[in-house]
Image (spheres, grey):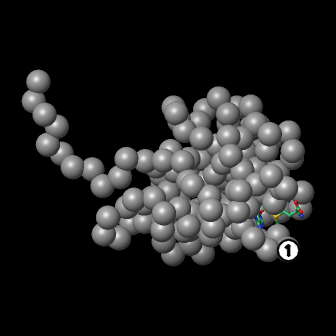
Amino acid sequence: MARLKQQYDSDGYFGIGIFHSAEEQNIGTLWRSAYILGASFIFTIGRKYRKQSSDVTKAWSRIPLYYYEDFDEFKKSIPYSSAIVAVEMTDTAVPLESFEHPKRAVYLLGNEADGLPPTVVSQCHKTVVIPGDYSLNVAVAGSIIIYDRGTKVKTSLPGRPG
Ligand SMILES: C[S@@+](CC[C@H](N)C(=O)[O-])C[C@H]1O[C@@H](n2cnc3c(N)ncnc32)[C@H](O)[C@@H]1O
């Protein structure tokens, strides 16, 4: 059999999404960051997204958004051999500075008012927290997490030499 000559930059991927987001704008902002910072897809659970006209990158036309009715449907649909990472302020979460991102990761953010329910966090494979006494805006939190991934995981950031 011939050997594979094609070279690949990266051997991983990630997606990111929000559980029961209450604000359309946060989904749009996260979508834009996700596209710019190298995500393969984004998703929402429990809320469909309606297009905003303000996104100059047209992120909606670059990477797909998936919609799941509830957490169970989402869990059944995640890509093979990928880890769900809860992004949440919990006592047992790993601080972002020392967090090791899984090669194949699906990051899950919580609702603007209530965060992720403990029953959802307990079903995720890992939990990561961004240091600070107050919670960040959900799209900001997601953007920081995936930027951090880009600095730690090989060639995860587009346009960067490996
Ligand atoms: C505005 S926060 C929810 C705050 C909510 N009032 C609470 O205390 O649970 C919305 C989401 O942003 C993310 N988030 C915000 N700040 C965070 C932090 N410091 N570390 C990890 N996730 C954070 C989490 O996914 C959270 O569920």
Looking at this view, name the residue that lies furthest to the left.
2
Return the x and y of residue 36 as percentages of the image width and height: 48, 68
Residue found 51% across the figure and 75% down from its top = 56
Residue 58 appears in the figure = no
* 149 and 29: which is toward the camera: 149
Q: Mark 1 points at which residue?
A: 133
Q: Is residue 40 above or below residue 89?
A: above
Which quarter shows the N terminus?
top left
Q: Is residue 153 visible?
A: yes
Query: What crowding class fits label 1: few (fewer than 14 Cα within 10 Å), some (14-19), or many (20 or more)?
Result: few
In the picture, measured across the screen, residue 53 lies left or right of residue 36, that is right
Name above or below for residue 76 compared with residue 150: above
Circle 1 sits in a helix, a strand or a loop, which is it?
A: loop
- Look at label 1 and name its amino acid: Asp
Q: Where is residue 158 in the image (x, y as percent from the top left)?
A: 39, 66
- The residue lying at 48 percent from left, 68 percent from top is 151
Tell me where residue 44 appears, x and y as whole percent: 68, 49
